[in-house]
């Protein structure tokens, strides 16, 4: 554990780990908005570049506020080390680009965030990196996809937007048998509800833009893993290519970490209640929420996650036209492709976040025209249910007395 000499509990780490005060003894972490650092002498500058003197060189490399965020997030994920990035995709692309070379092969879950699918299939392939997509629930499919040049397995659980849950420990074993790394995108579960490293993953990637910020303000991302992997593989790539997190954004995200546990647990409780309401209105097969007993991987979710999370998806009985009527009738919940905000946000993945994924591939992932994804916020559950009820009625999903 990083900088945790007192064996602090999770909630204490979320507000204390990584804090470094200046001579002013400020209680809140300072924002170091500086691109450079001055040296006492030319000799010191030379020593610092030679790695013989500890200290900051340039904020593309390191920044005190960014380091505080990295230390704190590492402590919350149970990782030895963390390197922050300007966005989740910057962190994820860096993980691929720093680890894989031309001629290597990556196996990725078919059920994956749209932009990650495109990075693997359109961009990595331009650099001669091969890939296979597999149904992440099918362990034989993972095994069958392994080639002698497979260097990485990549998955996301719960998956965006279908809320499928996949077995981290089982896929980690397949990766390790093949001498490959397992990278897990932990955005949907957050470090509050799931720590993939504990289940055998080698690397965790985050979009801090989502629940870590939690109030829809800034973009950020992070790669977490072993000290050697972060220092020797990720750090040099990040320093030289420059997708650095800004000090201001790091400060916002540090403050987000302080309340992450409270927010995610409250949202998760609300999400469970909204999921139960939707189950009653639309039928159990139409609702996808890992916290519902009817979820196909409910038992696995209970083992690997502490609660069902703040995200849910549901299938409306109709196509795009009906879904759009429903979305447009919502008065409280905002239509937005973002997620993890204090405000509840709803999206139609087929026409937005996953519109770049070819239709055939989309359908294989279970993303039909009727699927809607809801990021549950911090509003009162009564108001959310009332809003969803009136919009369902407006869309003609059901008449009568409603909820
Ligand atoms: C948003 C998201 C990302 C990308 O993060 P950005 O901060 O938008 O770059 C990656 N994975 C998942 C699951 C996401 O929801």
Image: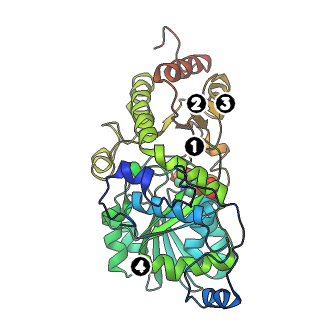
- Say if 333 sits above or below 37 in the image: above
Dot in front, 1 or 4 = 1
Find out if the beta carbon at label 1 lies less than 8 Å from the nearest ligand 1 atom. yes
Mark 3 crowd level (few <14, some 14–19, many ≥20, 10 Å Cα): some
The structure residue drawn at horizontal position 52% and vertical position 61%, both measured from the top left corner, is 68
**Which numbered disc, 3 or 2, marks the residue that appears first in the sequence?**
2
State the SS at label 1: loop
- Mark linked to residue 324: 3
Secondary structure of the residue carrying numbered label 2: loop
Give the quadrant of the C terminus.
Answer: top left
Neighbor class of circle 4 (other Cα within 10 Å; few <14, some 14-19, many 20+) is many
In the image, which is nearer the foreground, mark 3 or mark 2?
A: 3
Earlier along the polypeptide chain: callout 4 or callout 2? 4
Q: How is the image coloured?
A: rainbow
Q: In the rendering, which numbered label is found on residue 214? A: none
Looking at the image, is 15 positioned above or below residue 397? below
Residue at 48% across, 58% down: 19
Distance between the alpha carbons at the discs numbered 1 and 3: 19 Å
Task: Find disc 2 in the rendering and name its residue.
Answer: 318
């Amino acid at each position: 554990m990083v900088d945790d000499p007192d064996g602090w509990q999770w909630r204490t780490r979320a507000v204390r780990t990584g804090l470094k005060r200046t001579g002013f003894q400020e209680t809140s972490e300072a924002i170091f908005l500086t691109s450079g650092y001055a040296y006492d002498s030319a000799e010191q500058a030379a020593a610092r570049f030679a790695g013989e003197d500890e200290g900051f060189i340039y904020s593309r490399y390191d920044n005190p506020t960014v380091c505080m965020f990295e230390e704190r997030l590492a402590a919350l994920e149970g990782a030895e080390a963390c390197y922050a990035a300007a966005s989740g995709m910057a962190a994820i692309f860096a993980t691929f680009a720093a680890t894989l070379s031309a001629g290597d092969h990556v196996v990725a879950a078919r059920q994956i965030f749209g932009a990650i699918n495109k990075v693997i299939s359109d961009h990595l392939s331009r650099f001669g990196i091969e890939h296979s997509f597999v149904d992440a629930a099918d362990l034989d499919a993972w095994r069958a996809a392994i080639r002698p040049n497979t260097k990485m397995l990549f998955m996301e659980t719960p998956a965006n937007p279908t809320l499928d849950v996949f077995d981290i420990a089982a896929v980690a074993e397949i990766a390790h048998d093949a001498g490959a790394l397992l990278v897990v995108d932990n955005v949907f579960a957050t470090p509050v509800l799931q720590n993939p490293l504990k289940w055998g993953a080698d690397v965790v990637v985050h979009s801090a833009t989502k629940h870590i910020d939690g109030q829809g303000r800034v973009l950020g991302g992070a790669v977490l893993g072993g000290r050697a992997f972060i220092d020797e593989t990720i750090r040099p790539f990040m320093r030289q290519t420059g997708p650095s997190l800004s000090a201001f954004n790091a400060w916002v995200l540090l403050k987000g970490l302080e309340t992450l546990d409270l927010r995610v647990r409250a949202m998760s409780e609300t999400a469970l209640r909204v999921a139960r309401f939707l189950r009653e209105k639309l039928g159990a097969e139409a609702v996808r929420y890992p916290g519902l007993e009817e979820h196909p991987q409910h038992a696995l979710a209970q083992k690997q996650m502490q609660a069902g999370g703040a995200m849910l998806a549901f299938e409306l009985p109709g196509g795009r036209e009906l879904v759009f009527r429903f979305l447009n009738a919502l008065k409280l919940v905002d239509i937005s492709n973002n997620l993890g905000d204090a405000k509840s946000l709803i999206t139609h993945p087929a026409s937005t976040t996953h519109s770049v994924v070819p239709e055939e591939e989309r359908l294989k992932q279970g993303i039909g025209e009727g699927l809607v994804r809801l990021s549950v916020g911090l509003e009162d559950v009564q108001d959310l249910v009332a809003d969803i009820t009136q919009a369902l009625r407006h869309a003609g999903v059901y008449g009568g007395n409603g909820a």
